[in-house]
Amino acid sequence: MGTQSADMKREAYAAARTIAPKLHVYFAAHRETALRQGETNLAPLPEQETIETLVDAAFWASLRREEGFVPRISLAYLPQTQAERPLLLDRPLAIDPAVLTRVAPAVERPGVHLGVWRQQDELCIWGATRGIPPLCFVVEVSAPGLLVVKHHSGHQTRKFTNVAVIEGDRIKLVEESVSGPEAPPLFKSLIAFDSPGPGNHSAAAIIQLAAAMREHGHGGSLLFVPAETDSWRASIMQPMRYAVAPPYPATAAIAAVGGLTAVDGAVVLNTRYEVLGFGAKIVRKSGSPTVEQVILSEPVRDAKPSAVHPDQLGGTRHLSAAQFVNDQHDAVAMVASQDGHFTVFEWSECEHMVHAHRVETLLL
């Protein structure tokens, strides 16, 4: 088949070996649960060795360049018989960083995967596909040295579930659930993804907004405020710089709303998903104390919440968002950083302070 190359004699990626057994256990457990629930047409369970090989190849490919461009690749482990309308290659390709980098421009659009399976007892790329079955193992190159392991969940509300984020030698296994009164509602719904957040917030819509805020790369802030009251205006410099009248329905153009966050200041969105304005300047409410500490958490396995000063989260946007929620307990603030971090601020009744959740591991 000719799928070996000199490039495959490269140094092994240590993180691939570390995470492979954990990912195998994850996929095996979820497959067993799905079978017990009567689900069919599940993707095959990848062996530990297969996982290690795919993560290793994806990592080294992420560090290469093809005509100056960073490769964006998604590898999916499945036979071509389980793919929907696959594009099939006449000759299979090697699981090799150099090969992956060369074909990356053809498959860099979101939702396109290079299909990987064993032929003649050797892993190779048989083609490309958009449609993959539930629990299909996917490793995606998000940025140089940054990989995301995910799978198709089988539900339309959430096409993919992030399992792990690997950046260099750092491995983050995504927490599958969160419980306890200390976790505010929206954070729980973002992890569960199938339950509503506070007020009328839908976790799916929140994820779409977050993706739109991250896409422009400028960083930005968005404030969710109650539709039934104007008390939030006490925390916004008046008049609001770019007030919108009448309120604009955001659900019709979520990407456009995300673009508004690139303007200096915050977008204000009510719980009916109506844009009330953008470029809003947050001010401390009269008589309210300055926020000095927030609880910081991340939906990563074994990560412990910690109390930090808002300055440790980032710049002015983070400090302003924390102050806004500290003054307006029934509001939610979201901040996208230029470095890729994404933070959700909510008031925690249990802890009687602002809770800041770093959720970029759910968004990659």
Image (cartoon, rainbow, N blue to C red):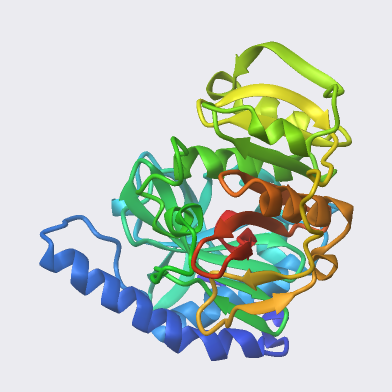
Report the front residue among 171 and 279: 279
Name of the residue lying farthest toward the top: 246
Residue 340 image offset from top left, x and y in percent? 76, 57
Q: Quadrant of residue 146?
A: bottom right
Q: Residue at x 52, y 82 (%)?
A: 52
Q: Residue at x 79, y 56 (%)?
A: 318
Residue 303 horizontal side relative to residue 65, left or right? left
Total labels: the figure holds 0
Q: Quadrant of residue 200?
A: top left
- Does 296 appear above or below 132? below
Residue 303 image offset from top left, x and y in percent? 57, 81
Residue 258 in sight: no
Residue 258 image offset from top left, x and y in percent? 70, 33
Residue 310 horizontal side relative to residue 33, left or right? right
Q: Residue at x 64, y 55 (%)?
A: 345
Q: Quadrant of residue 311?
A: bottom right
- Does 216 appear above or below 241? below
Report the front residue among 288 and 322: 288
